[in-house]
Image (cartoon, helix red, strand yellow):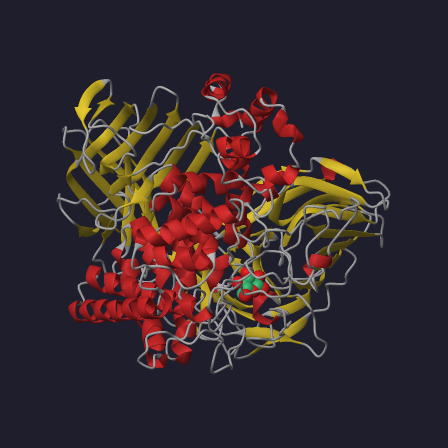
Amino acid sequence: MKITNIMIDHVHEPLGFMYRKKPCVSWKVEDTDAVSAAGTRLEISADDAFNEMIYDSGMVEWHENVFPADVKLTPRTRYFVRVTVIGDNGESASGTSWFETGKMDEAWQGIWITPDCSVSVQCPVLEKSFSLDRDVRRARAYIGAVGLFELYVNGVRAGSEYLTPYCNTYSEWMQTIAFDITGLLVNGRNTVEIMLADGWYKGPMTFDHIINAYGDKLGAIGEFRIQYADGSEFTAATDSGWLSHPSYLQSSEIYDGEVQDHNAACDTITGVKEFNPGTGLLCDRLSLPVTVESRIKAEKLIITPAGERCLDFGQNISGWLEIDEQLDKGKELKCSFFEVLDPDGNFYNANLRAARQEFIVKGDGQRHCDRPHFTFYGFRYVKIDGPEQVNIDDYTACVVHSAMDRTGYIETSEPQVNRLFLNALWGQKDNFIDVPTDCPQRDERLGWTGDAQIFCGTACYNMDAAAFYRKFMYDIYLEQKREHGCVPIYVPTFHPEKKTFDFSPAWSDAAVIIPWELYIHSGDRSILEESYQGMRDWVEFMRAMDDGSHIPEGTGFGDWLALDVHNDRAMTGITPKDMIAGAYYLYSTELTAKAAGVLNIVQDEADYSKLADDIRTAMQREFVTGSGRIASDSQTANVLSLMMGFASDRKYSAGQLNEKVENEGCHLTTGFVGTAGLCRALSDNGFNDTAYRLLLNRDYPGWLYEVEKGATTIWERWNSIKPDGSLGDVSMNSYNHYSYGAVVEWLYRNAAGLVPCEDRPGFRRLIYSPQPDSRLHWLKARLESAAGTYRSEWSVSKKSIDYLLTVPFDCDAELVLPDAPSEILINGNAAAYSRGMLLKAGTYEISYQPTVPYFPEYSLDSTVRELRNSAKVWETILSLLPGLKELPSYIIDFSGGSTLRQILDGNMMDCSEDISDAIAAATEDIMPWDA
Ligand code: BGC
């Protein structure tokens, strides 16, 4: 047995974080034959030998993912954590880790300082030297800054994080970053420097390019706490004795990029002065570290038809380039970052709108390894201007995002589905730079709440995103407090002075949906405790606007970018906005009632459950006809009725949805609101086949269309590249927008069957409900869930469906197998199957012959659509019935729903049973995956 992955408040070995009142310790148990935990013990000590114990739970019965430790923490202190687990077979193991507090609420010794100079310096450095006269045992730096900063100690950058102190609603709170600088100090003279740039605090942000959103001066506050080997202490802090000088950065901005001049005169020293940065409370951090996750070499150097030299990294990423260069003095190297080549194969960046996305370096004749300090780019390609030669090996792309553990893996027999899965994963990496953004490249890159809400379920499968979203939820809550619970359309708003916000159904509901998803995935109740007020405030905000009809006014973005309105300029789709608003009002109210239930807030649970019932009744009165028909002619309307629960007759609604999809030739017409739940609504309600057909469709509009077009991330629009190769509308066309990647949640839940159980959240119980389909003849999924590792694999053959399921220690899985007979094979033994049977920790091979055929059998009674689903089948039919080719093509094209018999009959062709038998025999060996 092994204890692994010990985390505190969902962070590995956190230094200087803002911990919960009761820090939550989580861990995993691996490598054991034990099935469940017989005892668990959590110890927290002030020393690593565990002698100065400050918390000891004793050996207790514990079957949850997180253990809240009732400890009183003191500032700037390291705590050691030990978890011991005993299995039901007597095996036991212990694991240790640590966490360290930051300044908490202790007073600062330093003051806020800013350069004191008459000319404005773009990216100044604040500097101080001090002497140490003994060996150092331990040293920490605590830094807060307005603008972004990098800390250097004796010329070496401290830590491995970038873009500190990150992006948040600075007017409400500011994050302090703590650094372990023990190894960087020397016995003797030391110099510390804080390099600053505008960043999110005062650089141009939003499509309106607001500058100085939170203040107009760069500055920092810092405290350096040094403990000598003999136990005595030395403290240095920002004060009026610090100095300032320019840096070699000429400019740096999030959207435009950075300019560096190695010849810059950085020796003009000025003093500093105290100032008030006008920000909210300086707190310990919540942001996860943003780090370089990996480095990629360019696949090739392209010389475009226009003669441009462009590096192709083969993958659309967020980050920057590291460049090894030796430029002549004064010579300029310019990198222009972009996502796609234009239809002629040339450089193209019109879709960046006003964001320049450049990195410019001016040489001094020396060799340097350059990288930008305070910006990032969304790119696959980089155009290089300046140097005579472009040596591909001199350029390395760095993939940069908030550091999160990857948790979800899916592979199938269909390479394009695998690419789609990876595209969504890349979309997550590229848009998780501290804030969940819409896109990482154009002059936007904002924490759009709708995009975040739509993708959150997928994100929580792909990665352990609990700590990442915790920080975002904190910002949302602080913005909400400014206007009676209203949730802005993006957060931070970069509008600290605004008293009212724009809000939108589905966007603003992020305040409720994200915490609920996090709770379901992590099993951590404290997420709900922390977020409950914000959830409640949003529902109350909606309720305050409710005129008693329970159907909110239709505002906001509707079904953003839906294709069901035949006008390129219309962005919001045909689904009525008040229906979307009502559906989300219902869903958010219901989730808030559930959260109240979990938190045992009895009155709220009853109150919100009643409100949800009333909204549902009102929605049905307004939007569902007596026969159960949903009164809007859109796919999204039906998806909402099923996913948000206002359908009066689910079967009817699902049938209606299926029909609409079929009528579109099995294409989707949904926008942001409908797409996320489309396949789930179909598979959950009896139309799994259509869900797979939608997924596997290769033409526009559909998920594999963009894969066919070479996408390496998810596009903002279904036709960001049009079928004729031309590029979509430049005013809004990102090639890295994760929202439509939310279909991956269907892959995890429906295709792989990895559904979390709300009663035992955090995957303590799995509802194992895979929905295989023979067009993917196998699927392999692995989920490093908060409770441990699940594996779900299946393959479909003409004989049987075979599954492999692994259930981790101290968890169980409830079986909901599709089309299973009453007796199945489990690990080779016959076992009675009943829906809902439980399997404890272990590995299971399950096999059965499904009660309905999983392989199509073709005959005269197959529809033309079924036959044409597979090119091979259709070719076979045409070779058997050459007369079909003679018919005018419209007869076949417009007869998808007719059977072959009807076509032959209608055109006076032979349709005897011999023909039917011949079709069955000729197509018998064609497998769906050969389609
Ligand atoms: C963003 C979206 C966002 C939308 C709201 C766009 O500009 O990129 O992803 O949700 O606006 O309408």
Q: Is residue 260 above or below residue 913?
A: below
Regarding residue 11, the answer to whether it shows in the image is: no
Residue nearer the viewer, 193 or 865: 865
Q: Position of residue 554 (x, y in %)?
A: 45, 73
782 left or right of 697? left
> Along the line of sight, which residue is nearer the eye, 337 or 76?
337
* Figure check: 140 above or below 577: above
- Which residue is drawn at the image coordinates 14% and 32% (left, top)? 88
Residue 686: x %, y % from top left: 34, 43
Query: Picture coordinates of residue 591 (x, y %)?
Result: 29, 62
Whether residue 627 appears in this view of the structure is yes
- The quadrant of the picture showing ligand 1 is bottom right
The quadrant of the rendering that contains the N terminus is: top left
Q: Residue at x 51, y 81 (%)?
A: 498
Closer to us: 549 or 478: 549
User: Which quarter of the figure has residue 109?
Assistant: bottom left
Frontmost residue, 396 versus 647: 647
Quarter of the image where the C terminus is located: top right
Q: What x and y, as percent, mark residue 46?
A: 27, 51
Horizontally, is 721 left or right of 739 in the view? right
Residue 123 against residue 78 in the figure, above or below: below
Left or right: residue 475 compared with residue 652: right
